[in-house]
Amino acid sequence: MTPTLLEKNAPEPDPVDEAITALTAAARGQRIIGAGTANEHSVPTNFAGTLSRILASVAANVGGIEALLQGRPESWEADYVCQLLRSTVGENEEYGTAEGFVDSWG
């Protein structure tokens, strides 16, 4: 099937906008505590932990922390991201798999 003129001129999806949408959905998420018990209830997701895992996965996918931050490595933002990632994966950058950080704490 030949694409229409509208389809040909459609802008490519912006990965930053898609990431914002995905992260917002993750931040609004809930998790179940005490599933299957009389004390079962939902609480907000651990977004800080989720974001740490996401950043660690991205760093693993692009070749490590240094590769992730190469666009502006001396910025204050890079410094904080580096601190967060070093706390998450350690000084030796132990990611677990090439696909991303393995969540060892559930």
Image (cartoon, rainbow, N blue to C red):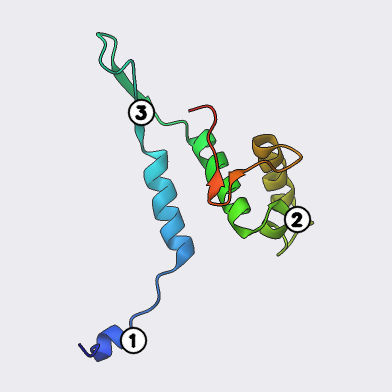
- Residue identified by numbered label 2: 75
| Upstream in sequence: badge 2 or badge 1 | 1
Dot 1 amino acid type:
Asn
Q: Nearer the viewer, mark 2 or mark 1?
A: 1
What residue appears at the point 34 percent right and 86 percent down from the top-left corner?
Answer: 9
**Residue 20 in picture, x, y percent from top left:** 45, 54
| Disc 2 and disc 1 in contact, CB within 8 angstroms | no
Q: Residues within 10 Å of mark 1 (few under 14, many from 20)?
A: few
Q: Nearer the viewer, mark 3 or mark 1?
A: 3
Task: Residue 9: give its label.
Answer: 1
Dot 3 amino acid type:
Arg
Q: CA distance from mark 3 to mark 1?
A: 41 Å
The single residue placed furthest to the top in the displayed view is 38
What residue appears at the point 36 percent right and 24 percent down from the top-left corner?
Answer: 43
**Residue 95 in picture, x, y percent from top left:** 62, 43
Using residue 79 as the reference point, say whether residue 51 is left or right of it: left
Tell me if residue 39 comes above or below residue 4 in the rendering.
above
Task: Residue 86: give its label.
Answer: none
- Residue identified by numbered label 3: 31
Q: Nearer the viewer, mark 2 or mark 3?
A: 3
| Upstream in sequence: badge 2 or badge 3 | 3
Using residue 11 as the reference point, say whether residue 53 is left or right of it: right
Q: Residues within 10 Å of mark 2 (few under 14, many from 20)?
A: few
